[in-house]
Image (cartoon, coloured by chain):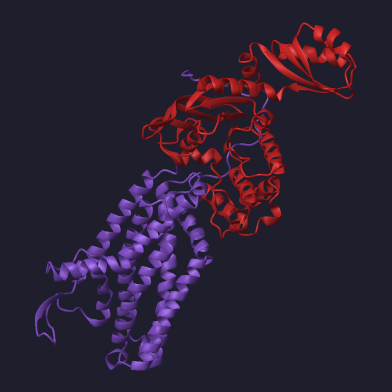
Chain colours: A purple, B red
Amino acid sequence: MSATPTFAPADGAPPADDGTLGTVPSTISQALILSRYQFRDYLRSRRFILMMGIVLAAGAILTTVVAYYRPAGLIDNADDLYGGLWAGGAGVVIVFAGIIFGGDAIAGEFQNKTGYFLMGLPIKRTTVYAGKYLATLAASIVSLVVYLIIVTGNAVYYLGLNAFSVPGPLIESFAITLLYLLALLGFVFLFSSLFKTSAYAVLVVAVLFLFGFSIIQEVVLNLAHTEPWFLLSYVNGINAYPLTGVPAHVQTVRNPFTRATSTAYNPTYLEGILVMAGYWLLTTIGGLLSFEREEFT
Amino acid sequence: MTPSIEAVGLTKRFGAFTALDHLNLKVDGAKCVGFLGPNGAGKTTTLKMFTDLIFPSEGEAFINGISVQKDRKRALEVCGDLIESPEIYPSLTPREAFQMSGALRGMRSDEVASRTKIVLEEVKMTEWADQKFGSFSKGMKQRVNIAAALLSDPEVVILDEPSTGLDPRGMAEVRTIVRGLKKGHRLIFMSSHILSEVIDVCDEVALLDRGKLLFADSLSNVTQRLGGGVRAVEAEFASPLDETVLAAQIGTFPEVAAWSRTDAQRITLQVKGGLVEQARLLEKIAAMRLGLLSFRESRSALEEVYLREISVGDA
């Protein structure tokens, strides 16, 4: 039938109400509402317990090792202690948080069919993406804060009140760590939106961040003898700079055994921030475009 | 505003396979329309395009005149839908999920609270309002999903096989719910392959087969027009009917083209003409004081039409 059949209105059906309740909120309000409930779902989930377990285990190992070896350069002052324990460990916490909270954030909407519930509502896909991103960001920040509390506990033990002597550099370091978190989550969400199966999304993200980038970094450094400035894993160390100072961009390193020299690179402040911001921007645009085009088949 | 949905040249191709082929269909007014078709006919594909879960290869879908593809947020504002048994975040309770859904729709918290009470009562899930969704059975989840679709008291309700996963009692309850929805000023567009369900609750039907719309009309017109101008009506009596009464009296009424006995107390009449003739025949039989209990369009009439139209497609 090619013609458009038109049904006549039902007879005698009086209006019982004045239509739909409420006025749909703005995109930003909807993203915040969604993130609140998604965050609540995270807090009650097993994955949150798993993440807290990882953070606490990492904190316990770190505390034990420091207590056993008592490395002089590390526990003498707050800058070095936070520079060593906080800045280094935070990157690892972020990678795990990204994998655990974000790996299936978008893919899960397809696989678990939660997307059918959300996407039936008057809400833009961009809003769903943003809401879930914010919730993952919040859950990851909770993990980071727990880790920071563990590090601060160590600092108080070794330094007493001096543990609180570096609020400015520590806040700066935390801010850079957040930028790294934003960029990493952008990357994780991009991969999550490319897959409709959660396991693939989580696996690819885990392999990339736990091994992939490190291998690429070594290959670029040792075989191509080039600064791997374009790798997110390379620039994440700049969160230590506010505490430990900015090292030389290029260093010549002599191997104590072979006496051979090689060139080592440290990202500059600007380089690190631009690369992180670039990753955040590009992966977010890519992830949004991918999610906008994905179908719930 | 009169609630409406409209498909204009709506087409969906998956590679070389055409799941929906230039569907043109406009439904408006407060009524319930059954969207019928065998498995794979393209019913869910159509509904998914109406809710923007998938995108048309060609054409457009409109809700209340607003293009779903161009402005999903505005188009879905007046719409409550249930497509393919969705899942709610497992650690949220129905009450929390409805709070989220209501807030995303812009409902006030007191509105959400009162509507939550009403819709959960409607689907008999009140006592589970504060249990986690992840712990529910398939049938319980489907009840909550139906309630979620009705939360905002929408003008347009799109339901994709709402009885899926429900036991017979649940299926009957869904029919009661849909009948109740018809009392409001709303359009209900419901896909189903359960013909008895459609006959029970729908005013109009659209039949889809292999991605093509075969017909769309009111239930009685479909059974009459496609039934060769004759409607099958079932009549039930309080006591067994005498054969002579049937043959000599009822069978001779000018409205009756043919009759057959279903069992001792029930007969099926092939009634010539439309609703007026049906009403006249009902009056005549009632006047005979034979203990008439019910007189309604045969459930098998639509089934016959359905099977015949589908088999034409097969041929």
- Asked if residue A270 can be seen in this view, the reply is no
Tell me which residue sits at (30%, 56%) in the image.
Answer: A283
Q: Seen from this angle, which residue lies furthest front? A: B315
Tell me which residue sits at (54%, 33%) in the image.
Answer: B39
Given residues A115 and B110, the one toward you in this image is A115
- Is A244 displayed left or right of A33 in the figure? left
Q: Quadrant of residue A260?
A: bottom left
Q: Quadrant of residue A142?
A: bottom left
Q: Position of residue B111 (x, y in %)?
A: 62, 49
Given residues B133 and B62, the one toward you in this image is B133
- Is B216 displayed left or right of B113 in the figure? left
Q: Is residue B243 above or below residue A200?
A: above
The quadrant in which the C terminus of chain A is found is: top left
Q: Is residue B91 above or below residue B300?
A: below
Q: Position of residue B178 (x, y in %)?
A: 66, 36
- Asked if residue B42 can be seen in this view, the reply is yes
* Number of marks in the rendered image: 0
Given residues A188 and A175, the one toward you in this image is A188
Tell me which residue sits at (21%, 71%) in the image.
Answer: A269
- Is A8 displayed left or right of A155 in the figure? right
Tell me which residue sits at (70%, 25%) in the image.
Answer: B299
Q: Quadrant of residue A102?
A: bottom left
Q: Position of residue A45 (x, y in %)?
A: 52, 65
Q: Is residue A175 above or below residue A254?
A: above
Given residues B218 and B233, the one toward you in this image is B233
Q: Seen from this angle, which residue lies furthest left? A: A260
Q: Position of residue B261 (x, y in %)?
A: 80, 18
